[in-house]
Amino acid sequence: MNTSRSILIRPPVLDDATAVHQLIKECPPLDPNSLYCNLLQCSHFAKTSAIAESGDSVVGFISGYSIPQRPDSLFVWQVAVSEQARGFGLAAQMLAHILSRPECEGIHYLETTITPSNKSSWRLFRKVAEECTAELRVSDWLDEEQHFNGQHESEELLRIGPFNSIRKVS
């Protein structure tokens, strides 16, 4: 990737779903969703999600939503950054972009699930907690055998917060 080329971060739109679907397929260990799911992420959850573009290419995507039972919490569903865009702090920039929006003014906690083997996600969310000087709590949530019938690694639940802002995370 040409690092001198600027990257535009914005809310996704419905027409981004196909590119998002392809990006996620190219970003193991992420679980690919159906294209229909990506259409919903890019429309119903656009205010709490982000697309990163370099020229005509989608190089990053974060999907998230406000948790209905805890409206002060944003659940980060997926974080995808293309191979050529990695190493520049793009995931943290997209997350900061989402949380700086007026729709997220009342968000004071981040939640996500991460498999123990997903080192890049662990680095990202530890960095976010550190930069926000917020507590990061980890608990067992989705068990490999009980919830995934042995077909998927267990997912641990991370909760970061409370925080006032993560705009400085980069």
Image (cartoon, rainbow, N blue to C red):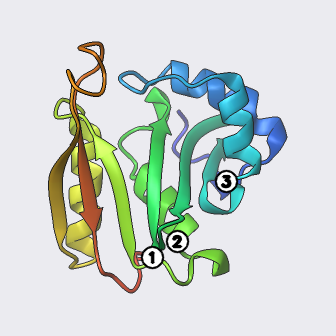
Q: According to the image, label 2 marks what residue?
A: 99
Q: Amino acid at mark 1?
A: Arg
When the figure is inspected, residue 137 is found, relative to residue 43, above or below; the finding is below
User: Mark 1 or mark 2, which is nearer to you?
Assistant: 2
Image point (33%, 82%), residue name: 163
Q: Secondary structure at mark 2?
A: helix
Q: Is residue 30 left or right of residue 20?
A: left
- Is 92 left, or right, of 94 in this rendering? left
In the rendered image, is residue 170 in sight? no
Which residue is the site of mark 1? Answer: 167
Nearer the observer, 169 or 25: 25
Residue type of the residue flagged with mark 3: Phe
Mark 1, other Cα within 10 Å: few <14 / some 14–19 / many ≥20: some
- Give the answer, above or below, for where 65 lies relative to 12: below
Task: Answer with mark 1 or mark 3, whichever residue precedes in sequence.
Answer: 3
Q: Residue reaching furthest right?
A: 15
- The x and y percentages for residue 62 are 53, 47
Name the image quarter holding the C terminus: bottom left
Contact between labelled residues 3 and 1, with CB atoms less than 8 Å apart: no
Instruction: Give the image location of residue 110, x and y in percent.
Output: 37, 65
Give the CA separation, mark 1 to mark 3: 20 Å
The correct choice, above or below, for 4 with respect to 93 in the image is above
As shown in the figure, which amino acid type bears the numbered disc 2? Leu
Residue 25 seen in render: yes
| Marks 1 and 2 in Cβ contact (< 8 Å) | yes
Label 1 or label 2, whichever comes before in sequence order: 2
Label number found at residue 45:
3
Give residue 101's quadrant in the image.
bottom right
